[in-house]
Image: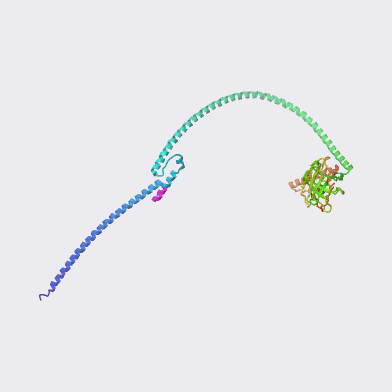
Amino acid sequence: MAAIASPRAAGGGSIKTALIVFVVLTVLSLGGMIFAFTYYSDLQAREAEARSQLDSANRNLRNTEDQLQQFSLMTIGAASTDIPKIRQTIDEVRKQVENAPALKEANVSLSAEMDLLTMLKGLLNQYNAQAERLKSVVAERDRLSSEREQALIKTAEAAQKQYADKTAELEKKYKELEQTAAKDRDAWQQQVESLTAQLEKASEAASAQLTGVRQQMQTIAQQRDEAQARVKELVATLASFRPQADLTSALQIADGQVVRAVAGENIVYVSLGERDGLTRGISFAVYSRTGGIPADGKGKATILVEQVFATTAECRVTSSTPSDPIIEGDLVANPVFDKTRRLNFVVAGDFDLNFDGRIDDPGGVEVARLIAQAGGNVVKTVDTRTDFVVLGAPPPAPAELGANETAEARERAAKQAAEREVFDKMVQEAKALSIPVLSRTQFLQFIGIKVPKNAPADQLPI
C-alpha cells in the first residue's frame, strides 16, 4: 500500500514538470526572440548605413560625371564621359596645333610633351606679342596715313590755287577773244553779204551757161545717134560685101610635126620646144601628113605635152586610131597655140563638155581655162583684134511672164533676156567682122581633146 502512489500525488508532479518545462521554453523563446530582434535591428542599422553610403557614392559619381562632362565641353566642345575619346580628341588638337603652318612660320615652338594648359599659355603669350606688334604697325600706319593726308591737302590746295589762277587767266583771254570775235563777226557778215551778191550774179551766169551746154549736149546726142545708125548701116553693108572667113587659112595650118614615135610606149616627140613658147599640159591633135587638117578639126590621135626641151617636147598619146597609128612626119596643131603671139579668143554660150546632154560648163568657164592653159588670151568683147570666137549653146530665152509673176521671176527673166542679148550681139559682130567661129566639137577636136565618135556636129548660128 505504501508503494502505490496516490493518483493526486502523481498528478501534482506532472503539472510541476510541465510548468517548469513551459517556463524554460518560454524563457528560451523570449531569449531567442530578444536575440533575433537585436540581430534584426543590427541588420537594419547596417542596411541603412549601406544605403546611405550607396546614395553618397551615387551622388559623388553623378558629380564626377557632371564635372567630367563640363571638362569635356570646355576642352573638346562636346559633353562626353568617354575618357578615351576625350583624350584622343585632345591629342588630335595638340597635333594640329603643333603642325600648324602659321605657328611654324611665326617660330612658335611647342613641345609634344607640353601639357595643354602650358600650350595654351604659350599661345596666349605669342598672341599678346603679335597683338603688340600689330598695334605698333597700326600706329605707324595711322601716322603715315596722317602725313599722306596732310601732303595731299597741301598738294590739293596748291593745285586749287593754280587752277583758280589759270581760270582767271583763261577768263581774261576769253573776254578778249569775245571782243575780237564780235568785231570779226561784223566783218564776216559784211563779207557774206558781199559774197552772196556775187554768188547770185554768178548763179545767173552759170544758169545761162548751163542752158547753152544742155542745148549743145542735145545736139551732140542727136549727132551721136545718127553716127551710130550710120555705123550699123556701114557694118551691115561691109558684111554683105566681105567674104566669110576662110577657116582653112586660120585653123588648117600645122604648128609642128612628129619627129619620133616610140612604138608600144604611147610616147611621141614633136618639133616644138621652149624656143617656141611651149609649156607642159598643152594638148595637140595629130593629123596625117598626106591628108592634112580637115575643116572639122578631127584628127587621127591626140597627145599631151609632158616634158619640154629646147627644140623638142615629149608627149603622151591620150587617144589614137589603131588602124592609123602615129608615124614620123604627122602634123600636130592646136588653134590656141601660136609661136609668135597670144591669140585673142571670145567665149560665148553654155557648154556640154562631157556630151551627156546637160550643160556642165555654164558661161564657158572651163573652155576659157583650156584656152588660157594653151597660151591663148580670153577677152570679153568682139572687135577687130579678136582672132577666134568659140560658141556654145545659146542661153535659154526668157519665158513669157504673166500678170501675177513674182518679183524674183521677173528679175530672173530680165537676167536671161540680158544674157541672150549679149550672146546674139557677139554672134552678129563676129559675122559682121568675118571672125572665124568654132563650135564646141570643132574647138575640142582642134585642141586635142577626144570627142565621142557618135557625137553629132554642132550647128553654128551663123
Which contiguous range is marked in magenta? 82-89
- Specify the color scheme: rainbow
Task: Look at the image and say whether residue 360 sits in the magenta stretch.
Answer: no
Name the foreground residue: 274 vs 125: 274
Name the foreground residue: 441 vs 340: 340
- Decide: is 141 above or below 407: above
Extreme-left residue of the structure: 2
Quick check: can you spot residue 397?
no
Extreme-right residue of the structure: 241
Relative horizontal placement of residue 442, taking residue 102 as reference (left or right): right
* Residue drawn at (42%, 39%) of the image: 126
Magenta-colored segment: predominant secondary structure: helix
Task: Look at the image and say whether residue 84 sits in the magenta stretch.
Answer: yes
Rendered location of residue 101, percent (x, y): 46, 42
Relative horizontal placement of residue 213, taking residue 136 as reference (left or right): right
Rendered location of residue 248, percent (x, y): 87, 45
* Residue drawn at (87%, 39%) of the image: 234
Rendered location of residue 326, percent (x, y): 83, 50
* Residue drawn at (75%, 46%) of the image: 412
